[in-house]
Amino acid sequence: MGQDGRKIANLSLSRRTALKAAALGVASAACSGSLLRTVRSAAAQGQPGGTLVIGKPYEITGYDPHVEASQTSWEIQAVVYESLIFLDDDLNPAPGLAESWETPDDRTYVFHLREGVKFHNGREMTADDVFFSLQRVLTYPEAWWDVKMGPPRQPDPAEATAAALGTPVAGPVVGLTIEVTGPYEVTATLSEPYAPFLASLTGTPVSIVPGAEVESGEIDLATQMVGTGPFQLVEHTQDQRWVFSKFADYWQQDLPLLDEVVWQVMTDEAARVAALRAGEIQLTMFENP
């Protein structure tokens, strides 16, 4: 990896770690210098309870995790939503909402889901929610992560003819099918081996959402956030602040340590610096010099 690649990787790791640390209960200042080093130090001495206030340079661009394509939205969504697979500290795929998986062959992945995981509305997550979520990413016109989830799908003759006539058939653009194979089991089958598949399931754009409620319209992902993450949304004032409270039924034992996370939208960098020095916020991010 070249020097530029290392810089990008380090920046991404710092931001991911910052969010992870917020979930774990970070309550320490992070000024200039290495954000990663500060977060790790804070995590090591974190105590249960309290509120972490973060100075956020920009407001999010939208609520829907399957649609948003900006870091400024992912920073918020990352404490609300979770994916099947997580990344460990070395950026390798690790168990997330899927506690384990098997690969009977190089095109098939069988995911075994954690039992007892609850959404913020109190309902247990099942394989139907995972199917709905992944299928939505694959077929929803405004979703965009689908192209990362598998090899390009080869259209059948009828689809090729329709496309040639100017009436393409809507459907997945990648060679990937999802199937519910048990109450807590989902099987994914690729049209051909695809090495980045597990990594593609770690992103916020493939978050698991409560399928039945979204499908019925009870939950509108464009205006609400309901996931399985450590914090649930309790207040949002546009261009001012976001307030998230600890989700009491979170599936990871003894987490989160924090009671509350608050994002203060502060577009002025000098104002964020002043707020850090005054102790009004404990964490923020700055543009690359």
Image (cartoon, rainbow, N blue to C red):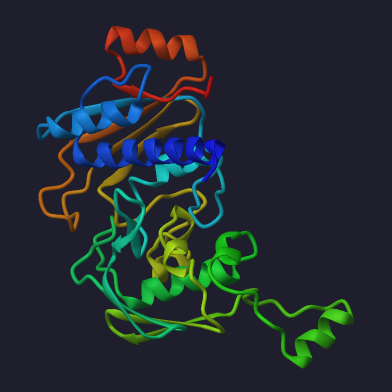
Q: Position of residue 13 (x, y in %)?
A: 39, 41
Identified at 33% across, 35% down, the residue is: 18
Identified at 39% across, 63% down, the residue is: 208
Above or below, 101 against 281 in this view is below
Q: Residue furthest right?
A: 165
Q: Residue furthest bottom?
A: 157
Above or below, 112 against 156 in this view is above
Q: Position of residue 12 (x, y in %)?
A: 44, 40
The answer to whether residue 224 is seen in the rendering is: yes
Q: Position of residue 200 (x, y in %)?
A: 47, 63
Looking at the image, residue 221 sits to the left or right of residue 122; the answer is right
> In which quarter of the view is residue 121 placed?
bottom left
> In which quarter of the view is residue 95 placed?
bottom left
Identified at 65% across, 79% down, the residue is: 153
Q: Position of residue 211 (x, y in %)?
A: 41, 69
Pick whichever, 260 or 177, lies toward us.
177
Identified at 57% across, 66% down, the residue is: 146
Pick whichever, 14 or 226, lies toward us.
14
Looking at the image, residue 131 sits to the left or right of residue 192; the answer is left
Above or below, 254 against 161 in this view is above
